[in-house]
Amino acid sequence: MVPVNYYVALSAILFSIGALGVLIRRNPLIIFMSIELMLNAGNLAFVAFGRSYEIAGGQPFFSGQIFVFFVIAVAAAEVAVGLALIVEIFKTRKNINIDELNSLKG
Amino acid sequence: MHLSESVSTGFFFLAPWLVFAPLTGLLINLIFSKWFKFSENWVGAVASLASGAAFVVSVLLAYSVSLNHGEVVRWKLAEWIHVGTLNLDWTFRIDSLSTTMMLVVSGVGTLIHIYAIGYMHEDVRFKHEEGRFNRFFLFLNLFIAAMMILVSGDSYMMLFVGWEGVGLCSFLLIGFWFEMDTLARPSWANSNAAKKAFITNRVGDFGFLIAGFLMFWYLGSFQFDEVFKAAPEIAHSMPWVIVAITLFMLVGVAGKSAQIPLYIWLPDAMAGPTPVSALIHAATMVTAGVYLVTRSAPLYTLVPQAQYIVAMVGAGTALFAATIAVGQYDIKKVLAYSTISQLGFMVAAVGMGAYVAGMFHLITHAFFKALLFLSAGSVILGLERGHHAHAHHVAHDDHGKKKKEGKHALSKAEGRKEEEHGHGGGHDEHGEVFDPGDMRNMGGLRKTMPVTFWLYMIGTLALAGIFPFAGFWSKDEILLDASLHFTSVYWQLTIAAFFTAFYMGRQIWMVFFGEARTDAAKHAEESPKVMTVPLMVLAVLSVAGGALNLPFEGFHNLGHWLGHTLGEVEGLPLDMKVAGISTGLALLAILISWFLYGRNPLKTGEIDPLKKPLGPIFTGMEGKWFVDEGYFAVIINPFNKISQFLADVIDWRFWHDFVHDTVILGTYNWLSEIALNEYADQKGIDGFANWLGSATQSVSATLRKVQNGFVRSYALSVLLGVVLILGYLILK
């Protein structure tokens, strides 16, 4: 059985790649993909910890796995909204460069 | 000394009704007369019955006292003041002295109530104020109630309540026509007269109160018996206390009973309607002082010095006022000064310790002076009727109309008609004010007003002290006592008696004899029965009143009766010398008055025949010896000056302008404008608020740079935040 450390390390690497992608890329589609990467890194960690603590106190314990379903559902909803926003932004500005979308500047 | 519980016989339980009966009448007239639209006769009847009920109660009480052989009965109605050592109850004192006063007050009072029905009926019409009829009887009943409290009180404080009550009624009734003068012209003269009476009495009341305080402080009580019991001991150890009490009491007496130096209010009090002059300012209220001294006899007897002063004040007043009466022209003013003079007789008598003589004169004087005043009221109204009737005739003649029955020009409609013709409101054809009380406007009234004439004659003879009228017996008793004890008082009173006969003779000749000096006098009309019948009763009493206390063995009825309260004194027999001198002088005075006024009656516009021979002396009498002017010069004007100074300089300039405007207002302005507004508010509070605002602005100006609108920088911040928190959690 692969030790849980490996899963966690992979998860951390995926999260870092995702975070880095969010910070350095200017295309919102790429940023969305990076966010998905970070979410799935979290999912991986949940699933890994959920699997290693499947039995807690003599009782079956599926919290990690269930949490992942929620994350996937929320991520799907988020992507739906996000993509709709991006489409609308593109319709109005003909441009989706994120560094030019600073009209909420204080 | 019996309290009510121990007495079973008699009608003593009725005692509270002395006060409640007139109060009931008052309340009925006050509350129901408007609702049920009482006619004037009803109002008068209710008031008279209320007063009559008090008279009946008085008679029953007097009867009960005689049943108990003159024993004092104290009927406690209610507890009154119980504070510390002061224990006062509302207790009626029923003894021979108080019942005597009750009989006089309610008896004469009832007759005057009845008379007033007729008098006020016309008076309110002459003054075009018919709505005031009811008010008059309210005041009259209130007066009877207050006077009953005064005479039936068992303590000096209860007496004082009545004393103030009658003073109030006196004020209200003098100022009954408060918005006019005695000739019904718009003026404050009547209300000034009322104020003068009230304020002068206040001076007297001050004396009474001081006497009361001293009494409580040194004798420990206000209750008559307790005071009299404690007095002899104090008189022995601290005689000045009793002297002070009695002399301060004398100040009160001088105020209420119009003695020197406080008599000045009584002549002005004639501004009140005539029944008031008769009831309050002749027969009853003004005798309260005499009653007070008589009631306090045990105190006065202890201090002969005070008695002497009282006697001298009384005698001086008797003589002084009698001289003024000689020079007066107003029929009521003559009687007013005569009243002062007669009150002087009474005060002199009680001052000499001749209490029975004083009370005797009080009673007979109540009869004949009420008779005289009421007859004078009849004369005045007769003249007023004549004046109006005549004015009415002339008015119609002027307009070429047929002469009408103008005799009863009294109804309001006719009064108005006269006003249209310019003859109303007491003005005669020449626009001058007609004075129906001026004796120079009278003359020859014996033909037009025969009943009033005979009644007036009886009153005059009684007042002048002609045998066998009531005044003869009572005045002679006083003179006799004076001749035995105080020679100077005796001579003063004798001379005063001479003047009395003279001014009354002068009045009779001027008013009733000779020829009418004005058209009003020519057309004067006799008064109705409702006025003359009570006068006839009073006339009978003035004739026969002397029988109360004849100076013969076995006839000293009043002396014996009052002896139950005042201690038995032996009645004096008739002294032919004293009686002869006074009667001789009275007859001589009447003869002189006939010589001056009767032989050659005064013509219209003629000056008084005394003026030439007496010169300045007559001017003095006419001007009331300028005592009022003296009071003005010595007291009132300086007082006004001081008041003006206090008002102008102290109050207005110093207090208002300087203290208020400069100091207080200035400080306030400085405080509000400089200290509070400029410093505390503008600089302090506003400054803090502004600083708060600008500080927020500058802080937010700095912070807004953080929000640069770049999503990625926000994400970086989030990431850094997470890293920081996680780093802290991991490394801690």
Image (tube, coloured by chain):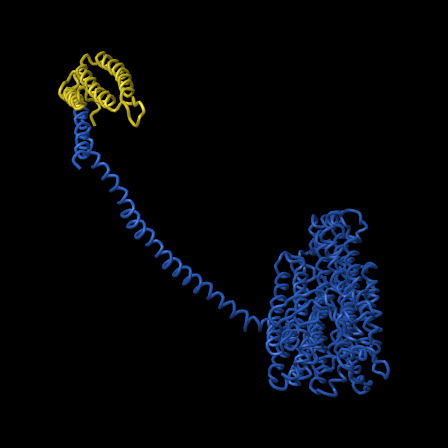
Chain colours: A yellow, B blue
- For the C terminus of chain B, the image quarter is top left
Q: Nearer the viewer, residue A89 or B418?
A: A89
Residue B363 percent coordinates (x, y): 77, 73
Determine whether B549 is above or below B428 in the image.
below
Residue B275 percent coordinates (x, y): 74, 63
Q: How many marks?
A: 0
Q: Nearer the viewer, residue B239 or B282?
A: B239
Please state if B459 lies on the left or on the right of B239 as rendered. right
Q: Is residue B308 visible?
A: yes
Q: Determine the image quadrant of residue B493.
A: bottom right
- For the N terminus of chain B, the image quarter is bottom right
Residue A17 percent coordinates (x, y): 14, 20
Please state if B704 lies on the left or on the right of B409 as rendered. left
Q: Nearer the viewer, residue B138 or B392?
A: B138
Determine whether B3 is above or below B688 in the image.
below
Q: Nearer the viewer, residue B511 or A73?
A: A73
Q: Is residue B710 visible?
A: no
Q: Determine the image quadrant of residue B46.
A: bottom right
* Residue drawn at x 27%, y 47% as measured from the top left: B683
Residue A89 percent coordinates (x, y): 22, 15
Q: Residue furthest right?
A: B554
